[in-house]
Image (cartoon, grey):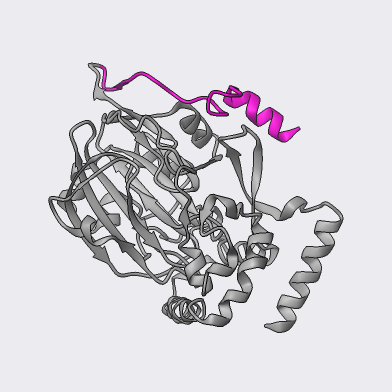
Amino acid sequence: MFLINWLHAILNHILFYLKLVPSRQVGWKSLNRKTGQLEREREPLWKKVKLILLFNPLTEWIDTTHAMRLWIHCKNVQEGKDEGTPASHNKIKSFIDFYNINIDEFEPSDPEKYGTFKDFFVRKHKEGSRPIHKKNDPKAAVVVADSRVVTYDTVPQAKKLWIKGSEFNLTNLVMDVNLGASFEDGSVASFRLSPQDYHRYHSPVSGTIKEFRSLPGSYYQVDPIALRSKVNILTSNARDYVVIDSPEFGKVLFVAIGATNVGTVYFHEKCRTVGTKIDKGEEIGIFQFGGSSVIVAFQKGRIKFDDDLRDCSNAVIQVSVEVGMSLGEATKPSANGGNESSGGYAFGQGKNEKSFAEAVKEGDS
């Protein structure tokens, strides 16, 4: 393992020096919603290589074996323990530097104030750093996590363009036939968190908790390379979910999904209690160390996602977003079966408006 890490460090340094991997951006393509710039995620080069080797038509069968799933589970448990030790504090600064994290957006903003890496990983946003879009307008839904998001009007559309697991549907995701049926032909937003992201998640709408459930499972990677393989990632991983009853949006399904290195998917106690009222943008849970994912599903005809999110998703491009940004508007089914809504979102949050095509062209130049 030492030799592999050493070779990886040398290769990464050479590629970075030659500008073949600028700023270590070797991850999947994303459009930064704040700037309108097309970019790739920062991630270790060796991680990228491992994903390509594991999740491809020739070798992805290995990921479904009992031996591989047991190994992933044991490795996950051990790494979770390691991240909670005092010695793990030493990796915080290098982690911040590698991923270029703006620590000033968090509280505390001094890395030395975190006793362990586990403490740092679940750091909180500084008050005011993530304003809530139309906070007092219940018809406006918001982004639930600092993440990369794709949105789809239907689950079949998501499977055609992004999530390739053969067993992915909302019934399998929640393991409940009746609940899954109530979201048939509904709209889906998929938020994928990377290790460098803020790992607390927030409610997309205001409403009342109607149901909570916890489901055990595996801890596969949720990188796009894995999601676009035939391995059933999202319906195999450990996950918890709540159903929120919203006067404006109807039932809203919120599923927090664990992934590699995630030791805990944790909804706050109040959000596990039926009848609890929650506000749009309110923190409702935490992921522990690692990449993670959130699926938010709306019933058919109840939301119109923002145009920029839909356009990028149809082009198989993620959008980098932050908690509290606009996600979409509440709708009611129109006579022709479509959605009726007003509003939308322009790149740059109104400061530097660009069309989707202009943003992609500029990002590729």
Could you say which is closer to the camera, residue 92 or residue 263? 92
Q: Farthest residue in the left direction?
A: 275
In this picture, residue 360 sits left or right of residue 239: right
Asked if residue 192 shows in the view, the reply is yes
Residue found 39% across the figure and 58% down from its top: 234
Could you say which is closer to the camera, residue 136 or residue 350? 136
Residue found 62% across the figure and 72% down from its top: 91
Residue 269 location (% of width, % of height): 23, 62
Q: Quadrant of residue 343?
A: top left
Q: Is residue 1 above or below residue 157?
A: below
Q: Quadrant of residue 332?
A: top left
Could you say which is closer to the camera, residue 283 or residue 65? 283
Q: Is residue 160 above or below residue 242?
A: above
Residue 356 belongs to magenta span: yes
Residue 342 belongs to magenta span: yes
What's the magenta region? Answer: 336-365
Q: Is residue 235 above or below residue 141?
A: below
In this picture, residue 26 sits left or right of residue 313: right
Residue found 77% across the figure and 50% down from its top: 22
Q: Is residue 205 above or below residue 106?
A: above
In this picture, residue 241 sits left or right of residue 311: left
Residue 102 location (% of width, % of height): 61, 51
User: Is the N terminus in the top left, top right, bottom left or bottom right quadrant?
Assistant: bottom right
Main SS of the magenta part reads: loop
| Total number of numbered discs in the rendering | 0
Residue 85 location (% of width, % of height): 51, 81
Residue 41 location (% of width, % of height): 63, 51
Q: Quadrant of residue 206?
A: top left
In this picture, residue 323 sits left or right of residue 352: left
User: Is the C terminus in the top left, top right, bottom left or bottom right quadrant?
Assistant: top right
